[in-house]
Image: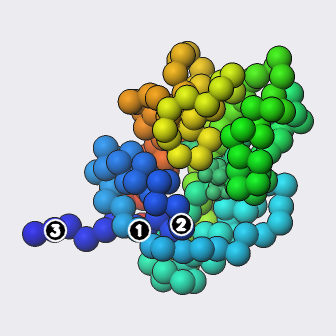
Amino acid sequence: MRKSFDLYFASSNKNKYSEAREILSKFQIHLGFFEFAPIEIQSSSILEIATQKSLDAYLSCKRPVIVEDDGLLIPSLGGFPGPYSSYVFKTIGNAGILNLVKSKRAAEFHSVIAYCDGKKPVLFQGITRGVISKKQRGDGWGYDPIFIPGGKTKTYAELDDKNTISHRYKALGKFARWFDMQKSSGR
Ligand code: IMP
């Protein structure tokens, strides 16, 4: 018989969900999708944005839920686009970022996973450091074609093992270990 979902991933982004589902399945956590288009608060902190999003998602979903907020940070651009990554992707896109980044190409991808089951949200953060590529490579979604994680020569879009090294994997790994402890302590 099909096992019911352990919890839901509330998002409008199916790419994030399919990666999250694959990552959490390695931890034996069965993740459902809850279609949700949040009204994002204006904040310079992705932790704050994720916290509010998880509270709103729980009000709609009414079941244990996680949401994710991400940011691509480029230190030579003062951390831009950071909390504005989604807007910047929709406006100037990868081509615009490539035009802005000159010689200092270091970049970081941050993920914040916020879990809410009606009580105070619990947050988990994952960071993958790397560099911005010189041109777009591969067919991935979002910033995947321009982000090369540390220790690799390929972009996220070209890698087969993105889901074992990504910012999302690191945040979800922390969440999975915590979630498992909650379950075994009967909470
Ligand atoms: P959001 O505000 O959490 O949706 O994410 C900020 C921006 O980063 C959006 O444009 C996402 O598409 C993009 N993004 C988040 N995670 C990834 C990823 O793993 N690869 C590529 N782009 C991503």
- Residue 174 lies, with reference to residue 4, above or below; the image says above
The reply, left or right, for residue 13 in relation to residue 181 is right
Question: Which quadrant would residue 91 be assigned to in this image?
Answer: bottom right
Q: Are marks 1 and 2 in contact (CB under 8 Å)?
A: yes
Q: Residues within 10 Å of mark 2 (few under 14, many from 20)?
A: many
Q: In which quadrant will I find the C terminus?
A: bottom left
| Lower sequence index among marks 3 and 1 | 3
Q: Residue 171 at x, y = what percent?
A: 54, 45
Q: Which residue is mark 2?
A: 11
Q: Secondary structure at mark 1?
A: strand
> Residue 168: x, y in percent?
53, 44
Dot 3 or dot 2: first in sequence order is: 3
Q: Give the residue type that dot 2 points to.
A: Ser
Residue at position x 31%, y 59% in the image: 30
The residue at the point 73 percent across, 62 percent down is 49
Seen in the picture, residue 34 relative to 105 is either above or below; the reply is: below
User: Which class describes the residues within 10 Å of circle 3: few (<14), some (14-19), or many (20+)?
Assistant: few
Inspect the image, locate mark 1, and give the three-letter code of the amino acid beneath it.
Phe
The verdict on label 2 being within 8 Å of ligand 1 is yes
x and y percentages locating residue 164 in the rendered image: 42, 33
Residue at mark 1? 33
**Disc 2 element:** strand
Return the residue nearer the eye: 95 or 133: 95
Q: Quadrant of the N terminus?
A: bottom left
What's the mark number on residue 2?
A: 3
